[in-house]
């Protein structure tokens, strides 16, 4: 893969890819660049909704002129981990979650929680860590809670909420997805009955309902089997 700084033409390709609704992975393949390069470029220059190639190129040139000597060095983390390694991992994890359908800020929140040993952060800690507004964090955690990908715990000592991710979260999220499939199967079944199973639309809805019901049942059985058979290191 090519190295070095992005060219102006590459930034135009990124801007066009975002406008076309491409994922970071798809844009990276088009450029033959690492996904982390694209993720970092877009994040540094306003995010996918505000990214502009000309402005990003000018901002990069201005940063290069200023140099990096004026920036205060990042303090080494207490756990001894390399900050650059953690940032790269966060970017890769975030890009992967975005590819699954999550919006970018919820994906960043989820990645941050997964990469902390405690698996828990407050809203204030997320704001500081991700450098976004409290309102953005509030909307992101609301989306993640709705999908049951995180849970909210009250910290009685500090009188503030903590957002938590642990092993049980994925079970709950999987079951929630199974329940949504079952609900959609019921709606499809009712639609088939209303339209008549002999009509083309009715037959289509009937088949859809059958497939979704089977999918929901399979998902629930898989979760139950998994919970009954813990991994060797659990």
Image (cartoon, rainbow, N blue to C red):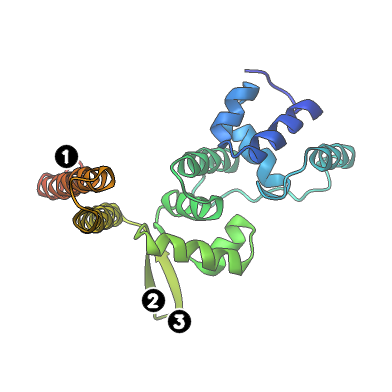
Few, some or many C-alpha atoms within 10 Å of disc 1 (few <14, some 14-19, many ≥20)?
Answer: few
Task: Specify whether residue 234 is in view.
Answer: no
Direction from residue 173 to residue 210 in the image, left or right: left
Task: Specify whether residue 160 is in view.
Answer: yes
Residues 143 and 129: in front is 143
Q: Disc 1 marks which residue?
A: 232
First along the sequence among labels 3 and 2: 2
Marks 2 and 1 in Cβ contact (< 8 Å): no
In the picture, the quarter occupied by the N terminus is top right
Place of residue 176 in the rendered image (x, y in percent of width and height, measured from the top left): 27, 58
Q: Could you tell me how far apart the alpha carbons at marks 1 and 3 are, in whole angstroms?
A: 38 Å
Question: Which residue is painted at 18% across and 48% down in the image?
Answer: 197
Q: Quadrant of residue 148?
A: bottom left
Q: Disc 2 marks which residue?
A: 154
Q: Quadrant of residue 16?
A: top right
Few, some or many C-alpha atoms within 10 Å of disc 2 (few <14, some 14-19, many ≥20)?
Answer: few
First along the sequence among labels 1 and 3: 3
Secondary element at tag 3: loop
Q: Disc 3 marks which residue?
A: 159
Question: Which residue is painted at 57% across and 42% down in the image?
Answer: 87
Q: In the picture shown, does residue 205 fall above or below 166?
A: above
Place of residue 205 in the rendered image (x, y in percent of width and height, measured from the top left): 25, 48
Secondary element at tag 1: loop
Q: Could you tell me how far apart the alpha carbons at marks 2 and 1 are, in whole angstroms?
A: 32 Å
Direction from residue 42 to residue 23 in the image, left or right: left
Direction from residue 55 to residue 196 in the image, left or right: left
Q: In the picture shown, does residue 18 fall above or below 152?
A: above
Question: Which residue is painted at 25% across and 56% down in the image?
Answer: 191
Q: In the picture shown, does residue 92 fall above or below 126?
A: above
Secondary element at tag 2: strand
Q: Could you tell me how far apart the alpha carbons at marks 3 and 2 are, in whole angstroms?
A: 7 Å
């Amino acid at each position: 893969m090519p190295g070095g700084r992005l060219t102006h033409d590459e930034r135009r390709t990124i801007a066009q890819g975002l406008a076309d609704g491409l994922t970071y992975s798809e844009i990276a393949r088009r450029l033959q660049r690492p996904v982390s390069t694209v993720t970092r470029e877009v994040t540094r220059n306003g995010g996918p909704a505000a990214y502009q190639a000309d402005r990003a190129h000018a901002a990069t040139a201005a940063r290069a002129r200023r140099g990096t000597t004026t920036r205060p060095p990042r303090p080494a983390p207490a756990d001894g981990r390399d900050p650059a390694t953690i940032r790269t991992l966060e970017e890769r994890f975030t890009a992967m979650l975005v590819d699954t359908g999550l919006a970018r800020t919820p994906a960043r929140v989820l990645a941050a929680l997964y990469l902390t040993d405690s698996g828990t952060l407050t809203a204030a800690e997320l704001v500081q860590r991700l450098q976004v507004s409290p309102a953005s964090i509030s909307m992101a955690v609301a989306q993640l809670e709705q999908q049951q990908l995180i849970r909210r715990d009250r910290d009685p000592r500090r009188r503030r909420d903590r957002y938590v991710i642990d092993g049980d979260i994925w079970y709950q999220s999987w079951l929630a997805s199974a329940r949504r499939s079952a609900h959609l199967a019921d709606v499809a079944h009712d639609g088939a009955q209303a339209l008549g199973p002999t009509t083309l639309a009715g037959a289509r809805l009937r088949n859809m309902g059958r497939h979704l019901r089977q999918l929901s049942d399979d998902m629930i059985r898989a979760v139950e089997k998994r919970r009954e058979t813990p991994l060797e290191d659990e």
